[in-house]
Image (tube, helix red, strand yellow):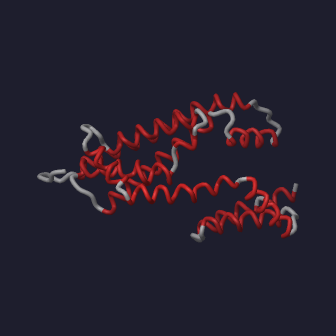
Amino acid sequence: MAGDGLALIGVAVLVASFLLRLNPLLAVVLAALSAGLAAGLSPLAVLKAFGHAFNANRYVGLVWLILPVVGLLERHGLQARAKARVAALKGATAGRVLLAYLALRQVTAALGLAALGGHAQMVRPLLAPMAEAAAEAQAGGATPALTHEVRAYAASADNVGAFFGEDIFIAMSSILLIRGVLQGLGVDVEPLRLSLWAIPTASAAFAVHGWRLLRLDRRLRRLRAPGRTS
């Protein structure tokens, strides 16, 4: 029991690393290393566990194939075209664009299609430019602060939709993780029940974040100075 408690030192190392603003990758490595050593593993065993995890999750390296494609598309005007399309739509606002994406992201994640969205392949090249174009029209112009705020909301729409939507899909790893933790505490819950109980949580998350996105629209309209044109 004491060994299990010492293994939690990795959590403390992770929190301390983020508070010190260390590189996220370095923070994760330090946390895993400290947890392994505290659990009684030798440095060689910890290194072996790292190697096994990397070999078992090689698909993570696919992001390095996506980035050049996204960069090439942006070089040929993908963001500019996305902005132009949204600017041509009547009634399009930053909040509505992001709310529509939030709904789409959450529904597709609930169906197990979590790979359809993402920051690298969807938020940066398409969603953020579209929301920026709508925000500029609403506010009558753009400032660096406004641009960064809209980008942050675009990223949050993807995060919230994916995080709460994927828990509804019964075969998602998050469901298996929750079940494993509960079983370790002596509570046996079927994955289907976990998925069903994730629906109210996902609905509440959609309502709260959707309300925040609509509030963004109201604030953008107030930023528009009298006499300025979009």
Q: Give the side of residue 217 with respect to residue 54, left or right.
A: left
Could you say which is closer to the camera, residue 141 or residue 216?
141
Residue occupying the far left of the picture: 227
Q: What is the quadrant of residue 145 in the picture? A: bottom left
Q: Where is residue 147 in the image (x, y as percent from the top left)?
A: 34, 58
The tally of labels here is 0
Q: Give the side of residue 172 with respect to residue 148, left or right.
A: right
Residue drawn where x is 36% and y is 41% of the image: 97
Could you say which is closer to the camera, residue 107 or residue 32?
107
Q: Give the side of residue 212 with respect to residue 23, left or right.
A: left
Q: Give the side of residue 199 with respect to residue 226, left or right.
A: right
Residue drawn where x is 73% and y is 43% of the image: 177
Q: Position of residue 146 (x, y in %)?
A: 32, 57
In the rendered image, which quarter contains the N terminus?
Answer: bottom right
Q: What is the quadrant of residue 45 in the picture? A: bottom right
Residue drawn where x is 87% and y is 58% of the image: 2
Whether residue 159 is situated above or below residue 172 in the rendered picture? below
Q: Where is residue 222 in the image (x, y as percent from the top left)?
A: 24, 49
Residue drawn where x is 60% and y is 70% of the image: 22
Q: Position of residue 188 (x, y in %)?
A: 80, 33
